[in-house]
Amino acid sequence: MEQQHPFQIWTAVRRGNQTAFKELFDLYWDQLFAFAYKVLRDKSMAQDVVQSLFIYLWEQHAELPPVNAVDAYLKRALKHRLLNSIRQENIYQKHVNLFQQVLEESVCSSHDVLQVKESEQQLLNAIESLPDAMKQAFYLHRVEHLSIAEIAHLQGTSPQTIRNQVNIALKKIRLKWTIAETIMVLWMSYMFL
């Protein structure tokens, strides 16, 4: 079969053509997998995310929008799936692990343990209350230690937007905490530097 233009392949996929879907898969799998692996640094997770994107495309083929730039559409869809995967996989577990480590490494009274657990919950609540884009930018910068430029590239936005989101997120989190809790968090962050 003669290779078609991506626009023609996409149009045929939208109509439910299985051969066109296989051609789309073959045409973009390697490129999308390479990008996912670069972001996640885990082959299995990268394969899962790209595979879930293709499953979604096939299951929703009748509802897919008409697209002229198939490559750009697929990359944007993959970026959203990668961000969701990162958030789902890590955001809570990393914070819980950090607080558990603090509890295990220090000799604390039951009152201290209770305060740490309450502060942990307040931190998670404060982070969870942030708007999604801000929460993702904050998490990627402060927990995953990605640079502003890396996050901007990943989210497809400007570095200044990411800087603003991280700074506003910090301000919102600080407003939700008392001074004592803020001091405790600063103390814990210096312990782990």
Image (spheres, rainbow, N blue to C red):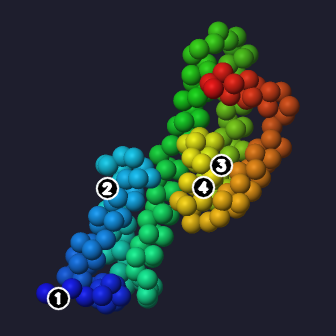
- On screen, residue 31 versus residue 172, left or right, reads left
In which quadrant is the C terminus drawn? top right
Q: Residue furthest left?
A: 1
Q: Kindly report the distance in space between the C-alpha atoms of the residues bearing marks 4 and 1.
A: 41 Å
Q: Kindly report the distance in space between the C-alpha atoms of the residues bearing marks 4 and 3.
A: 13 Å
**Residue type marked 4:** Ala
Of mark 3 and mark 1, the one earlier in the sequence is 1
Of mark 2 and mark 4, the one earlier in the sequence is 2
- On screen, residue 119 versus residue 137, left or right, reads right
Residue 2: percent from left, percent from top: 17, 88
Q: In the image, what residue occupies the spot 63% across and 42% down?
A: 142
Hey, which quadrant is residue 112 in on the image? top right
Crowding at label 2, few (<14), some or many (≥20) Cα neighbours within 10 Å? some
Mark 4, mark 3: which one is toward the viewer? 4
Mark 3: secondary structure: helix
Residue 141: percent from left, percent from top: 62, 46
Of mark 4 and mark 1, the one earlier in the sequence is 1
Q: Is residue 60 above or below residue 89?
A: below
Callout 2 touching callout 4 (CB < 8 Å) = no
Residue 169 visible: yes
Q: Which residue is mark 3?
A: 138
Mark 2: secondary structure: helix
Q: Is residue 180 above or below residue 175?
A: above
Q: Which residue is mark 4?
A: 149
Q: Which residue is mark 1?
A: 2
Of mark 2 and mark 3, the one earlier in the sequence is 2
Which numbered marker is on residue 78? none
Callout 3 touching callout 1 (CB < 8 Å) = no
Residue 115: percent from left, percent from top: 73, 23
Q: Which residue is mark 2?
A: 47
- On screen, residue 2 versus residue 108, left or right, reads left
